[in-house]
Image (spheres, rainbow, N blue to C red):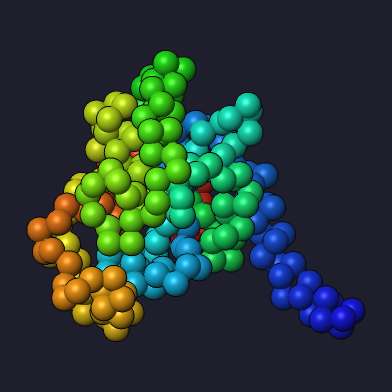
Amino acid sequence: MEKTMRRFLVLALPALLACAAAHAEYDPRAGDVIFHTSRSAQSLAIQKATNSPYSHMGIVFLLDGAPMVYEAVQPVKFTPLADWTRRGDGGRFVVKRLVDADRLLSPATLDRMLEEGRAFEGRPYDLRFEWSDAYVYCSELVWKIYNRALGIEIGKLQTVSEFDLSHPAVQATIRARWEGQPSPQEPVISPSPCSRARCLKRCMRSSLP
């Protein structure tokens, strides 16, 4: 048992120290958009279909002073920032912030964003990536909160036809979730265009592009 624990510490300690150092550098602000490479079963499929290292994202809120990531998992919920970043590959993450955050993200605006966000709380995760509010996926949650509260588009909406569905991991996900192929004209937003949105600037990088 002791030998196993020592081996675990040797393997895990570098990642834990890197994660702690990154947190020390990051000053969380409500409205920040945070990205990482998830270690979920669908992560590789998302990366290949969207040609991006990012496969999961959320939005930061400060609840009673504590930084929380509001995310669409199963179900939509608030997750402590430290727990959220530890779930990413190697504990690495990237944070982006509105270019004009000081002016646009007033207390009243943030309250409105939180109100829009709470309308989704508890909703199940959308395995089929559809544009309905009944089920929600990660980038859809962030996009709809910003769009409905501020009229801002965090990234350009795409359709399924614009994705690369050729990779075996993508095809395996499609076979597991759809009968046939997903609708090519289904509106969709992924972490990739969100991460490139011109209205955002990077304020924290922890070893991701």
Q: Quadrant of residue 130?
A: bottom left
Is residue 157 something one can see in this rendering? Answer: yes
- Residue 145: x and y in percent read 34, 35
Tally of numbered discs: 0
- Point out the image quarter for the C terminus: bottom left
Tell whether 149 sits left or right of 9: left
- Residue 98: x and y in percent read 37, 34
Q: Quadrant of residue 143?
A: top left
- Residue 5: x and y in percent read 83, 76
41 versus 92 height, above or below: below
The residue depicted at 31 percent of the width and 27 percent of the height is: 149
Tell whether 73 sits left or right of 68: left
The residue depicted at 33 percent of the width and 61 percent of the height is: 127
Of all residues shown, which one is farthest toward the right? 2
The residue depicted at 63 percent of the width and 28 percent of the height is: 65
Of all residues shown, which one is farthest toward the left? 185
**Could you say which is closer to the camera, residue 61 or residue 94?**
61
**Could you say which is closer to the camera, residue 188 or residue 9?**
188
59 versus 137 height, above or below: above
Is residue 195 something one can see in this rendering? Answer: no
Tell whether 186 sits left or right of 177: left
- Residue 128: x and y in percent read 27, 61
- Point out the image quarter for the N terminus: bottom right
**Could you say which is closer to the camera, residue 104 or residue 55?**
55
The residue depicted at 27 percent of the width and 33 percent of the height is: 147
